[in-house]
Image: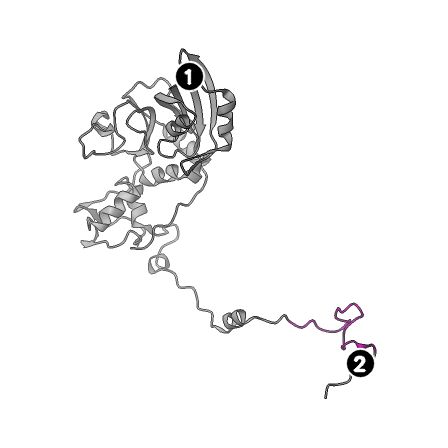
Amino acid sequence: MRPPKPPGGRPPGRSPSGKPGPGKAIPPPKLGRREARANSRPVKPSVPHPARADAKPGREPHRIAKLLARAGVASRREIERMIEDRRVALDGVAIETPATLLTSLKGVTVDGKPVAAPEATRLFLYHKPRGLLTTERDPKGRPTIYDRLPAGLPRLMPIGRLDLNTEGLLLLTTDGEFKRQLELPATGVERVYRARAYGNVSQEQLEELIEGVEIDGVRYGSIDANLERRTGANVWIEMKLREGKNREVRRVLEHLGLEVSRLIRIAYGVFELGDLQPGEVGEILQHQLVAFRKTLKSVKGPKTPPA
């Protein structure tokens, strides 16, 4: 038998509006099965990685691939390949994963040679001529930038690439981690190009590129393009972009019906090609480099999956 309802047909402690009356506690909400199971499990204390637990203040451990890149050994991707090939060792024992955490490079060797502690990052501007590949070596034996760089430079890594027939400003650095930071699309450093192309295009067509464009299933982000001048059947166009996908400028202009005959990168961020002649190299002063790095977005790239 159900208990009799109170006068007025309302449960105790309820006002006519259905809200709890004064002096009555609001019952807690009912938990679903998933929440109830989660609350019943014991909370495990967070256990830091041994390398982090033993680290002294100010000496946070980092992945060995990051430390080696910072020391200028190679880019992170190249270092990961070196580790796969068992070329990197710690105290004589081959490293098995690029995720290994270390606070320093003490005892680390590459191809049996000790790795020196990282020095201050250095940045160079190089006027890449046409006809050179932006790579260390080419299986087909074609000339690369390393065949033409002046003697006496430290080991340098290119930041991004310029294809075989593109000329102009190429940044080179001693720091693989700095290289990686600048190459991440999310960092958003502006690149400026000048293109000479055969064909007809209007400023209105170029201005539409500010919204981005999709070509053959590939989406290209916003491009600030301006028609500089016409010389006979050719046009000169300035293009500013922040993504730098492979052959982006050429593909976008070809999409507009133009045939690119010359492509020059004239700026990368605050650094300009200026009067640097083809094949010449100039170094950025340390205070200029420090100021530039402060302007960069703090961006984390995709995590490398454990080996």
Asked if residue 110 is positioned above or below residue 159 in the image, the reply reads below
Which residue lies under the disc numbered 2?
6
As drawn, the residue found furthest toward the bottom would be 1
Quadrant including the C terminus: bottom left
Label 1 residue SS: strand
Please, which colouring scheme is shown?
A: one colour
Q: CA distance from mark 1 to mark 2?
A: 89 Å
- State the image coordinates of residue 226 (x, y, percent, origin top left): 48, 21
Quadrant including the N terminus: bottom right
Q: Amino acid at mark 2?
A: Pro
- State the image coordinates of residue 182 (x, y, percent, origin top left): 38, 36
Asked if residue 112 is positioned above or below residue 141 in the image, the reply reads below
As drawn, the residue found furthest toward the top would be 232
- State the image coordinates of residue 94 (x, y, percent, origin top left): 20, 54
| Residue 48 vs residue 181, the one in the foreground | 181
Residue 291 lies in magenta, yes or no? no
Left or right of 209, for residue 176 = left
Which residue lies under the disc numbered 1?
235
Magenta extent: 8-28
Quarter of the image for residue 200 reads: top left
At a point 25% along the width and 26% down the height, the residue shown is 132
Q: Which mark is residue 145?
A: none
At a point 26% along the width and 45% down the height, the residue shown is 79
| Residue 146 vs residue 210, the one in the foreground | 210
Query: Tag 2 or tag 1, which sits nearer the N-term?
Result: 2
Dot 2 alpha-carbon crowd within 10 angstroms: few under 14, some 14 to 19, many 20 or more:
few
> Principal SS element in the magenta part?
loop
At a point 32% along the width and 32% down the height, the residue shown is 161
Asked if the residue at tag 2 contacts the one at tag 1, i.e. Cβ–Cβ closer than 8 Å, the answer is no
Left or right of 69, for residue 4 = right
Q: Amino acid at mark 1?
A: Val
